[in-house]
Image (cartoon, grey):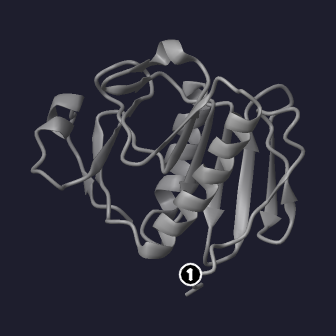
Amino acid sequence: MPQLKEKNYTIKDIYALPDGQRAELIDGVIYDMAPPSAQHQDIIFSLSRKIADYIDQNNGNCKVYIAPYAVFLNEDDKNYVEPDISVICDKNKLDDRGCNGAPDWIIEIVSPSSQRMDYFVKLFKYKTAGVREYWIVNPSKQTVQVYSFEGDENSMQFSFDEEISVGIYADLISVRFRLPESAEIH
């Protein structure tokens, strides 16, 4: 689990961290982030490329951003996250600092040290902040947990060899998720 620093912190404290130290701020609590593994980076690259290609091929307006990319969830000074992948369709939320408000779709790649954050803390935070769809990719279990927070909210779990529908894109029937060949399961 990421190291938890208890105090009422603000975004100023995040920006005051030493160079190279990454952390997220949720409701005034700082959570240190471990550096991503090569497998983690391979998955982020593969998924973000597929999503960006789909958007480009369909002349879409959404933008895909990969970590580290600043997301100010509640447009306050108590919440700052760096999702592994953020898909943002409202260009009014974007500025030079990052995304101000909830992205439409967030994907997190879970690691042993981030499970509690991804499955509990961020799940609740993303839902209440207005994220439309949230995926948790678990390489060690080879599963993808998909949460849809629109309409009839639901959650479904898929294995890596199943087709997964993307809820925010009606015409994207499904994406077959595969680990990049260079990514090994531990």
Residue 136 picture quarter: bottom right
Q: Position of residue 143 (x, y in %)?
A: 72, 68
Q: Position of residue 20 (x, y in %)?
A: 17, 55
Nearer to me, 19 or 123: 19
Q: Give the residue displayed 72% in from the left and 70% down from the top.
A: 178
Q: Give the residue displayed 57% in from the left and 85% down from the top.
A: 184
132 shown above or below 135: above
Q: Quadrant of the C terminus?
A: bottom right
The residue beneath circle 1 is 182
Q: Give the residue displayed 29% in from the left and 34% down from the top.
A: 28
Q: Quadrant of the N terminus?
A: bottom left
Task: State left or right for residue 104 relative to residue 14.
Answer: right
Q: Tell me the SS state at disc 1.
A: loop
Amino acid type of the residue tagged 1 in the rendering: Ser
151 shown above or below 155: above
Residue 79 picture quarter: top left
Q: Give the residue displayed 47% in from the left and 54% down from the top.
A: 117
Q: Position of residue 72 (x, y in %)?
A: 39, 27
Crowdedness of circle 1 by 10 Å Cα count: few (<14), some, many (20+)? few
Nearer to me, 50 or 40: 50
